[in-house]
Amino acid sequence: MLSLFIILPLAITVIVNILPKKMVYPLIGAVVGMVALVQMAAVFLPVSQPLEIMRSLGELVRWDLAVDSLTLVMLLSIGVVVAVTVLAGTQLIKDKEQYFQFANLVLLTLTGMNGVVLVRDIFSLYVFLEITGVASFILIALQKDSDGLEGAFKYILFSAVATIFMLSAIGIFIMSAGGTSFGAIQAALQASSGNIMVLLAIAAFMTGLFMKSGLMPFHGWVPDAYEGAPAPVSVMLAGVVTKAVGVYTLLRVVYSVIGFTPQVKMILMGFGVISIVLGALAALGQTNLKRLLAYSSISQVGYIVLSFGCGTALGFAGALFHMFNHALFKSLLFVNSASIEKATGLKDMERMGGLGSKMPLTGLSAGIGALSTAGIPPFSGFWSKLVIVVALWQAGLPVYAVIAVLASVLTLAYMLMFQRKVFWGKTLEGFQQVREAGFGLMVPTIVLALAIVGLGIGFPLLFNTFMLPVDRLW
Amino acid sequence: MSIHVFYIIMGLMTLSALWAVMARSLLRSALALACASALLSISMFVLGSPLAAVFELSVCAGLITVVFISTISLTQPMSWHETMQHVHDHLKKYWYLPVILLIGAIVLTTVKVTFNIKVPETNVPADVRDVLWHIRHLDVVGQVLILLVGSFGVSLFFKEKHKK
C-alpha cells in the first residue's frame, strides 16, 4: 500500500504525457493538485481495509518501505507544499507548455520526495535523493533566465560534491555491513564503532547532508537557488524540497543508522547554532526579499537541527514540529513574495514601501508568517520554538536554550524590517495602481495563513497526534 | 594477472582523468574521460566484477561519451588566441593537481594503511536478472524516474534552442 505514494504520481506522469495535449493542458494543474490532496487525505485517513486491487498491487511490489510519525509529518508537509506550488504556478507561469512541463517536474519531485521519506534502504535513499535533486535543478532553471541558470548551476555544483561524499560513505557502509538496509548498516556500524574508516564514512555522509540541508557554512547555493528560481519553485524548494532531501534525511539517518553518540550530538548542535545565528545575521543585511527569506530558511533549519541534536524525545518532537511549521510559514512568505513581485515587478525591498494599503491580504498574511517565524504567540511557530527551548533546557543545555531565544529576537528584527520596508508607511509613487495578486496566489495565501493561526490555537491536536508519538520511536 | 599490470592500469586511469581536467578542448576532455572510464572497466573486470565492468563500459565510456560529443558538436570552436588564453588560464588554475596526484601516489605506495574492515559474506544471487527484478526493483523504478526527469530537462532546454 505504501508503494502507492510512489506509483500514483509516477503513473499520473506517464498518463498525462500519453493523452492528447489539448485535453491535458487545461487539467494538469488540477490533476497534480488532486494527487497532493489525496496524499494529505491518506495521511489523515489511513485505509484500514484496502481494496482488493490495491492489496494485489501491494503484494506485487515488495519494496522496503515503512512509515512512522516522522514519515507521516513529511508526507503531510510534501502534500501541502506541492498543492500550494501548483496553485501558485497557475498564476505565475502563463505559457501553457511551460506550465505543463513545470507540473510534470513537480509530480516527479513529489515522487522523489515520497521515496526519500518512505525507503529504509541506504542505496534506494540515495537514488530518490538524486531524483529529487535532478528534478529540482531543472525546475530552478525552468525559465532559462540568467538568475535561474546561475542558481541551478550552484545547486548542481554543491549537490554533486555532496553526492560524492555520500556515495563514498555508502560504499564503506555497504562494505562493512554486507547489505543496504538501515538495520543491517546500523548493526555493522555498532559492531565496528571506533574504526577510522567507518568514522570517516559517517563524517562524509553527514557533511553531504549538511550541504543538502543548506546549513551554514555549507549554504553557498541556497540564496542564489531560492532567488533565481521561478516564484512557485522557490515555494517548493524552501517549503519542502530542502527539508526532505537534507533535514529529513539527516534526521532519519542519524536516528535509524548512525545513532546518537556524544560526538554526533555535539556536531549537530554546533552546526545548528552556527546556522541559527549566522543565518539570522545575514538575513538582517539583505535588501532582496527572496534572499532575506533564503537566509531566514538557513536560520530556521538551524533550529530543527539543534533541537534534534539534543538527543531527547522532546527534542525530536520539537524538530519535527518546527519542520512542519517551517513548511507552512516559509511557503506562505514565499507566496507573499511572489504576489509582491507580480504586483510590483520588484524583489528589492529598498524600492518598495506602503504596499500594505494596496495589498491588505498579502500584508496581513505576511505579518502572520513573519510573526510565526519569529516565534510570537499565538501562531504555530511559537509552540515549536517553545518546545525546542524546553527540550534544550530539560536536556541540561541552558546555553543553547538561551541562544535559541536570543536568535528569535534577531528573527523578529529582520522580519519587522521586511514588514516596515515593504508594507508600512505611505504608498510610494508608482504603486498607486498596485492590486492584490489573483486567485492562484490568494487561495494558498489564505489557506496557509489560516493553517498557521489554526495550528497555533489547536496546537495540542497535531502535536499529540503526530509529533509526540516519536516517544515510541525512541 | 600480476599486481604490477593492475598498478599500470590504475596509473593510466589516473593520467586519463588528469588529462580530462587539463585538456584544452572539450572534445579531448570527453575522449580522455571515456579513456578513464574504459580503464576503470578493465580494472573492474580484473577485480572479478564483469557485470559492473560491462555497465561502466557501455554507459559511462559509451553512451555518456556519445552524449557529450553530440553536445560539443553544437558549440562554436574557439579561435587560436582564445584557445591559448584558455590553456594559460587552465594551467594557472590547476597547476597543483599533478603535484597533489604525485604526492598522493608516493604517500599511498610508501605508507601502509590498514583499515581493518571485515567484509561480510553476502547472499546476493549471481544472476543480474535476480538482482534487478527481485532485489533492487525499487532502484529500477528510480532509474525510470531519472530517465523521465532527464527527458523533461532535455526537451525543455533543447526545444528553446530549436525555436531560436
Image (cartoon, rainbow, N blue to C red):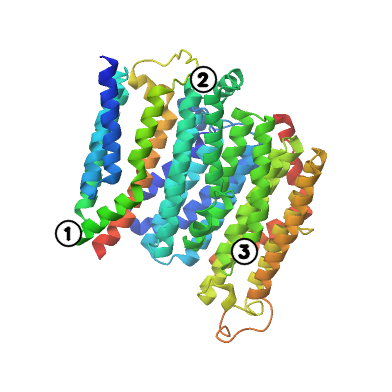
Q: Where is residue A226 in the image (x, y as percent from the top left)?
A: 51, 58
Q: Which residue is drawn at 30% across and 51% down?
A: B90
Find out whether the residues at labels 2 and 1 contact each other: C-beta distance under 8 Å.
Answer: no
Assess whether mark 2 and mark 3 are in contact (beta carbons under 8 angstroms): no
Q: What residue type is labelled 2?
A: Ala
A344 or A161, nearer to the observer: A161
Q: Do the residues labelled 3 and 1 touch (CB within 8 Å)?
A: no
Disc 2 to disc 1, C-alpha distance: 54 Å
| Disc 1 target residue | B80
Q: Residues within 10 Å of mark 1 (few under 14, many from 20)?
A: few
Task: State whether residue A58 is above or below residue A116.
Answer: above
Task: Find disc 2 in the rendering and name its residue.
Answer: A177
Tell me how far mark 3 sits from mark 2, CA to CA: 48 Å
Spot occupied by residue B31 in the image (x, y as percentages of width and height): 21, 41
> Compared with residue A250, is residue A430 higher up or lower down, i.e. above or below?
below
Q: How crowded is mark 2: few (under 14 residues within 10 Å), some or many (20 or more)?
A: many
In which chain is the residue bearing label 2?
Answer: A
Would you say residue B57 is visible in this rendering? Answer: no
Q: Please, which residue is most extreme toward the left here? A: B80
Q: Is mark 3 on a helix, strand or loop?
A: helix
Mark 3 or mark 2, whichever is nearer to me: 2
Give the residue displayed 60% in from the left and 84% down from the top: A428
Quadrant where the C terminus of chain A lies? top right
Is A437 positioned to the left or the right of A447 in the image? Answer: left
Horizontal side of A446 relative to A106 (left or right) equals right
Q: What residue is pinned by disc 3?
A: A445
Secondary structure at numbered mark 1: helix
User: Looking at the image, which is closer to me, A361 or A179?
Assistant: A179
Same chain letter for marks 2 and 1:
no
Does residue A190 appear to the left or right of A142 in the view shown? right
